[in-house]
Every structure is written in structure tokens, then in C-alpha cells.
Amino acid sequence: MFGVWSIPEITQAIARSLEAHALALDAERAVRGLDALSEVEFHPIIARGLESLDLSVWREWPYPSFVGTARQPLPRDRERCDLVLAPAGIEPPADPIAQAASRRAAAGSLFEGQLLADLHASDAPEPEDLFWLEIKIVGQHVVVDGAERANAQYSSELVQAGRDLEKLASDPRIALGGLALIHFTADKRTAEHDQGEVLNRWLDRGWPVRNPESAGFALTDRIANQWCSVMLTPVRP
């Protein structure tokens, strides 16, 4: 468990949703498989899997950082988290930056009292009560300009994926979160070896790594990837 969140359950739910999508592509004899999807195409697939755990899932939700400081980013400049999880049946999460902007706009007006009352009465969960999940996709073999080839940036992409751990940990309003690495390889043995190596690289860089949870499944060979794994690494508080 990580706080109130079960990292094994989340990992398994992600893997099940991806495997089901891969099998559906196989059934329709799709030319391209799961490993040819873009990163954003994974988000709704993973969200549906997490909703099976009786969770609410919000996609591309803004990070809650920089509230109360001199730096107040414009909406278009704000960092956004791929998926944010909460127990099912609750209101969308509170957005501290939007709330702060509303307070500034209403300050001294006739509406200030009503705004403060509405904020106080809201049941929206606070950022600290949510699970913030970043997704990264790395393949040993990839499709580039319609052609299948070995990924020349494979090692560096694995290492750089860990930067999202640092981003999550640096936000003072995020208490719980993690990075889900969706990893395509030629076989299971390669996945296990390379994930062990990349965890050491992340630790060498001082990134906030906790023990990860992994799950995986066999993949139909279309571009030389025959294994898909999910490695979910929680952020160390």
C-alpha cells in the first residue's frame, strides 16, 4: 500500500486494460498493434482500466503548484498531469490556482463573501488526497515515419522517463503519486533486466524512487516487440 492506494492493484488494472486492448487489435487483425499507439492514445485505455477499480479518473489535470507565490502561471503555461485518481462518485478535484485567481478577482467586491462560502462548502477533494499518475511509453522497437525499426534512443528514453518522478515530488501540494512506465521489449527477460538498470540510473540521479510494482503480458509480434510490461514507481515523499 502507498497511503490509501494499492500500487499492485493499480498496476494490475493498467496491465489488464492494455492486454484487453491488445487482444482486441489482434481479433480485428489490425496492421498496427498496441506498441504503435501514441502516448496520448494510451490515456483513455488506462483510464478505463482504473475506473474498473471504482475510481474516478481525470485526464490532463493541472498541477496545483505555485499557489501563494509571486509566480502565477497562465492557464496555457501550466504543467498538467496525465491522470489524476480519486474515489468514485466525488466532485472534480479542487484547483488551488483557479481558486486563488477567483479570490483575487472577487476581493473587495460584493461577491467576496459568497465566493468564500462556496469554497468552504465545496466537497471537492484537495490535491493531497489524490493520486497523481504520469504515463511514459518506451519501446525497444518503434514505428518511425511508417517504418519499423530498433529504437536508437531506447536507453536514453528509459532514463529520461524518470524525470516525471522529480516533477511530481517537487510539487508541494502532491503527497501521493507515481510514474507508470509502459515498456515494450523483445521478451520478458529484456524488460526485467532493463527496468532493473534504469531504476539504478534513477537512483544515481537522486530521483525520488520507491520500490516499483510490475506486471506484464505477451504481445503479438508486429514490430519485434513481444512483451509489454507496466512498471509503476511511486514517488518517495
Image (cartoon, rainbow, N blue to C red):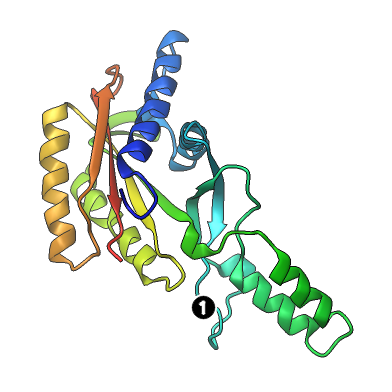
Residue in front for this viewpoint, 231 or 35: 231
Residue 211 position, x and y percent, is: 20, 51
User: Which residue sits at x=16%, y=28%?
Assistant: 188
Amino acid type at mark 1: Phe
Up-down relation of residue 170 to residue 40 (above or below): below
> In the visual, does 31 lie left or right of 76?
left
Residue in front for this viewpoint, 192 or 87: 87
User: Which residue sits at x=51%, y=63%?
Assistant: 127
Residue 154 position, x and y percent, is: 22, 44
Quickly name the residue at label 1: 66
User: Which residue sits at x=39%, y=32%?
Assistant: 13
Residue in front for this viewpoint, 115 or 227: 115
Q: Tell me the element at label 1.
A: loop
Q: Which quadrant of the structure image shows residue 10?
A: top left
User: Which residue sits at x=18%, y=68%?
Assistant: 206
Up-down relation of residue 223 to residue 86 (above or below): above
> In the visual, does 78 lie left or right of 8?
right
Up-down relation of residue 106 to residue 146 (above or below): below
Does residue 89 show up?
Answer: yes
Residue 119 position, x and y percent, is: 71, 70
Q: Which quadrant of the structure image shows residue 163?
A: bottom left
- The outermost residue toward the right is 110
Q: Which quadrant of the structure image shows residue 208?
A: bottom left
Q: Quadrant of the C terminus?
A: bottom left
